[in-house]
Amino acid sequence: MPDVAANPGSTWLIAGGWLSVAAALLHIACIFGGPEWYRFFGAGEGMARAAARGELRPTLITLGIATVLLVWAAYAFSGAGLLPHLPLLGTGLVIITAIYLLRGLLFVPLHFRRPQHSDSFAIWSSLIVLAYGAVHAVGTFRAWRYLAP
């Protein structure tokens, strides 16, 4: 494993990894919190009603998202040197960063196209995800030469 202290992006990638872990845990908490949690975290009324009916679909979707977020955390921790080098580490971190940034930035054109969907959750979640993307971007950029196998 690379030396974490020598990697100038490690602090940023460790922070990004923990942000992804936190997001995964919030998704898992929604499963246990039930329909009100799905509503509060913006999953939509359909997901909340399905959870209230005891359907498996909301749980599976939410577990799938949480799993993806945990894989993203593993990539950030790997890029920081805390975990062994994962396959396609640099490419993976660039893709993860792009997804976070696009998710955060897509709010702007969607707001102008459908302002009725611009509630406070949409605004705050977009800003939060944009911050996640910025943390990953800085970490990936600063660690780039340490990401090669």
Image (spheres, rainbow, N blue to C red):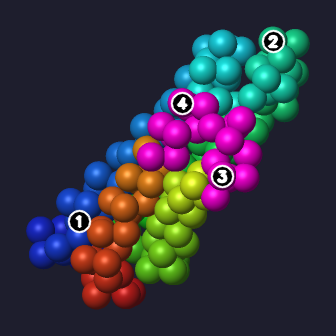
Instruction: Tell which of 146 and 110 is nearer to you.
Output: 110
Residue annotated with mark 4: 120
Question: Could you say whether the residue bearing mark 1 is in a helix, strand or loop?
Answer: helix
**The N terminus lies in which quarter of the figure?**
bottom left
At horizontal 48% and vertical 75% (from top left) the residue drawn is 94
Nearer to us of marks 3 and 4 is 3
Residue marked by disc 3:
112
Q: Which amino acid does the dot numbered 4 rest on?
A: Ser
First of labels 1, 3 by sequence position: 1
Q: CA distance from mark 2 to mark 3?
A: 33 Å
Q: Is residue 47 above or below residue 33?
A: below
Q: Select label 2 or label 3 by which is in front.
A: 3
- Which residue shows up at 30% across the image and 69% down it? 138
Nearer the viewer's eye, disc 1 or disc 4? 4
Query: Which of the two discs, 1 and 4, labels the residue nearer the N terminus?
Result: 1
Disc 2 marks which residue? 52
Judge whether residue 63 can be spotted in this image. Answer: no
Q: Earlier in the sequence, mark 3 or mark 4?
A: 3
Whether label 1 touches label 4, CB < 8 Å:
no
Q: Position of residue 148 (x, y in %)?
A: 37, 87
Residue occupying image coordinates x 35% and y 46%: 18
Q: Which mark is residue 10?
A: 1
Question: Where does the image place residue 98, in percent across and percent down from the top left?
Answer: 53, 69
How far is mark 2 from mark 4, CA to CA?
A: 24 Å
Q: Earlier in the sequence, mark 1 or mark 2?
A: 1
Is tag 2's residue or tag 3's residue first in the polypeptide sequence? 2
Residue at the left extreme?
A: 5
- Residues drawn in magenta: 109-127
